[in-house]
Image (spheres, rainbow, N blue to C red):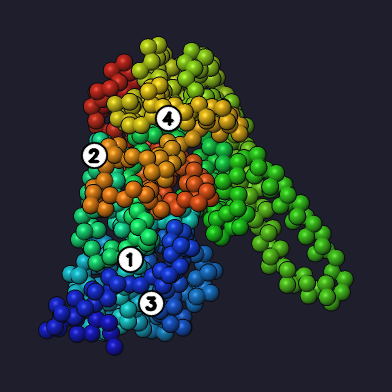
Amino acid sequence: MSTFAGVGGEHSSHRCQQLFTQIKYFPLYWQNKKLVLIMNLISGIKLYIEKMCTESGPGMKIILLDKETTSIISMAFSQSDMLQREVYLFERLDSGRSNERLKYLKCIVFIRPTKQNIQLLANELRNPKYSAYFIYFSNIIPRTDIKYLAECDESESVREVKELYADYLCVNPNLFSLNLPNCMANLNWLPDSLTRSVQGITAVLLSLKLNPVIRYRAGSQVAQLLAKLIYDQTTKESSLFDFRGNVDGAAPPLLLLLDRRDDPVTPLLHQWSYQAMVHELLNIRNNRVDLSERPNVPKEFKELVLSGDQDEFYGTNMYANYGEIGSTIKQLMEEFQRKANDHKKVESINDMKNFIESYPQFKKMSGTVQKHLCIMGELSSISNKRNLFEVSELEQEIACKAEHSAQLQRIKKLIADERVDIDDAVKLVALYALRYERHANCDTSGLLQIIKTRGGNTQIVPALIEYAGTHVRQGDLFNMVRITDAVKLTRILIKGLKGVENVFTQHTPLLKETLEDVFKGRELDPMYPAINSELVPFRRPPQEVVVFIIGGATYEEAFAVHQLNNAGYRVILGGTTIHNSQSFINEVLTATSGTQFKHTKSMLKYCSPDNL
């Protein structure tokens, strides 16, 4: 009998209410393993997908997706993983499809509850192509839409309707993205991006079973508005957020909403850890690297999947630095050559048996070695061509040390050098402008003149100052603290005494210091006020923290979160997108487009005409 049977008739309203309650109380069957799994996003998404495949029962299945849920599934499961669960066909609900009826197939529907998707699904149910439908929405669906779908299911082919809170892209176990490369215009939210952010964060909280204190960066209108809408949603859906109380008087979890404009430096720096470096130089999108435009790359490596969950080598080494990766790949290659030589010695029946048993693993290892050698070859080539070692060292010096006159001379020399890529030259000037914006001898205009002479885009620097200059930022981005601030001064002195591992990794994201303050129980008011203050009066620091950065997170910040989690803390990081320097600059230009610039009068001749 159809799940919707009777919903469209006289008792429509009552039956619809019953169904809606059933949906809202979708159980996570790993709830009792909270301490093990609660802060691993990939495990959570996988368990949701397992649930879909199991509930539809044995037999051949097709899965019907939309554009976003296709990405959500592909980042957690490979196609071969889905085949093992008897899912043999993948179709998009929102693209051209065949009208062929396949009544021998069951259909799993996994879509976002958007108006367009609801209408497309209604059309499907009016003229069903498959024997049975198991419908899963990636977020909360309005009851009016449930009733509408029920009325369209005249053939009673729907067997299951549930909500799965998988409305975000899990990049790493501790990192999620909403794939919103540009979330602002005129330095305010784009309405669609705001709505999507509320939905994505709500889904993360529900999938992790968290009802948190919501704090936002004071003075940031975008953070305050997002905090208010998330609070409104959690209040409206209070029964969904009615989780078990805090054990042993522990503080409630924390949702911390930050503004990218507080730390514009981290996305501008060249990165040297593997995952961050690949994203900076080759661009990772939905765990895939597109090398189709790169010369001399073999055809089979034009698109590469980089998933820590599906590639053991990458999962183990994504946070290793460039030098470590080189030596690790060398060891992997030596092991591969040793195994290849072993396979040549097939002399007996027993040898043949061992060869057949170990061949799949050998083949997989061969692919891993070739893939990462290809990537490292590209990284090495780009780094040498663009003189990135020298450029990156100076970037780090600007970000971490106040040595104005010496740095100014080095910048002038480097940006005038034709061997230095013009985009790298612009980033050096941008870092200088951010650091020395209010320095008495600041010479940003002189540096921009050199950029202009070389044909570079001078509009980037004034746009960046308007977007994230000192008039916007809170906190000590460049550690320009007063001696009266004893705690922070001591921290800086200790950091200076400890030194750094190497000149390319001196910088620490502002996020790491913020999270250390959170876990040490330091006062968060007034810089991060709480919007639901009734949950606040706990003296202990929170055990679980979800951080969301409006304007995009970075892989360097994900690395910092990984280090904190390894130290025993429990943090999830998310952002409207995952930035590299180029995508961040694009977002800055989009966010400031059409805005009248008020804080860069000395650079007016380098601004875009629409900012004057």
Q: Earlier in the sequence, mark 1 or mark 4?
A: 1
Tag 1: residue type? Answer: Arg
> In the rendered image, is residue 288 in sight?
yes
How many residues crowd mark 3 within 10 Å: few (<14), some (14–19), many (20+)?
A: many
Instruction: Tell me whether the residue at label 3 lies in contact with that at label 1, contact meaning CB atoms closer than 8 angstroms.
Output: no
Of discs 3 and 1, which sits in the foreground?
A: 1
Residue at image position (83%, 75%) is 350
Tag 3: residue type? Answer: Cys
Gap between marks 3 and 1, in whole Å?
A: 35 Å
Residue with the mark numbered 4? 488
Q: Position of residue 501 (x, y in %)?
A: 61, 34
Task: Identify the mark at residue 107; answer none if there is no mark.
Answer: 3
Q: Residue 420: which quarter of the image? A: top right
Residue at image position (52%, 48%) is 567
Q: Earlier in the sequence, mark 4 or mark 2?
A: 2
Gap between marks 1 and 4, in whole Å?
A: 37 Å
Of discs 4 and 3, which sits in the foreground?
A: 4
Q: Position of residue 327 (x, y in %)?
A: 70, 44
Instruction: Tell me whether the residue at label 1 lies in contact with that at label 4, contact meaning CB atoms closer than 8 angstroms.
Output: no
Of discs 2 and 3, which sits in the foreground?
A: 2
Residue with the mark numbered 2? 221
How many residues crowd mark 2 within 10 Å: few (<14), some (14–19), many (20+)?
A: some
